[in-house]
């Protein structure tokens, strides 16, 4: 049960049924790296900019995204959320449409797959990193 306003905003009229318990998924949130907007002191969250490349990551922001891969693997290892010998644990990346978010997710994903130490840990934890950004 939803309503759509004239400007296309979707309004949920009631809560969905409760989720099954226990859930078997783990979720980790990643904040975007430094963006050009951050450097300029601009808050750029207007919907009109969502698919724009305006306020992309700076080189430092890209490196912050890559560094987040190591931290993500540390969290997964600490929480014991790796896969088993029988089944790999799939890792998906979901992102907002803003360039800074997409680029941060992509840089984290890249570092999981092309950094030697990270790749070893991905294999050790038996993770299956999905390479399509959702």
Image: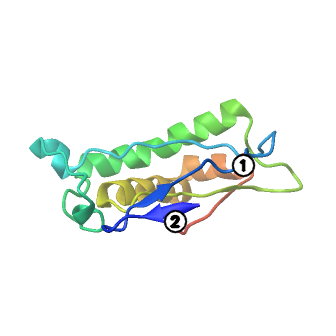
Q: Nearer the viewer, residue 25 or 56?
A: 25
Q: Position of residue 92 (x, y in %)?
A: 60, 58
Image position of 8 with respect to 89: above or below: below
Identify the residue position indicated by label 1 in the image: 17
Alpha carbons under labels 1 and 2: distance apart: 25 Å
Q: Position of residue 103 (x, y in %)?
A: 36, 59
Rendered image: mark on residue 134? 2
Please state if 67 lies on the left or on the right of 39 as rendered.
right
Disc 1, SS:
loop
In contact (CB < 8 Å): disc 1 and disc 2: no
Q: Nearer the viewer, residue 56 or 82?
A: 56
- Give the number of marks: 2
Q: Dot 2: within a 10 Å radius of its alpha carbon, few (fewer than 14), some, or many (20 or more) residues?
A: few
- Residue shown at 56% from the left, 67% from the top: 131
Please state if 46 lies on the left or on the right of 81 as rendered.
left
- Residue shown at 78% from the left, 56% from the top: 88
Q: Position of residue 129 (x, y in %)?
A: 63, 59
Q: Nearer the viewer, residue 86 or 40?
A: 40
């Amino acid at each position: 049960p939803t309503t759509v306003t004239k400007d296309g905003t979707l309004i949920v009229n009631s809560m969905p049924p409760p989720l099954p318990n226990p859930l078997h998924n783990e979720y980790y949130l990643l904040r975007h790296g430094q963006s050009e907007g951050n450097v300029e002191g601009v808050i750029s969250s207007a919907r009109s900019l969502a698919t724009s490349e305006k306020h992309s990551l700076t080189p430092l922001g890209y490196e912050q995204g890559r560094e987040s891969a190591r931290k993500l693997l540390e969290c997964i290892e600490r929480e014991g959320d790796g896969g088993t010998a029988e089944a790999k644990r799939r890792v998906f990346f979901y992102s907002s449409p803003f360039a800074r978010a997409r680029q941060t997710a992509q840089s984290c994903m890249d570092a999981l797959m092309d950094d030697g130490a990270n790749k070893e840990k991905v294999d050790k934890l038996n993770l299956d990193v999905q390479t399509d950004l959702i």
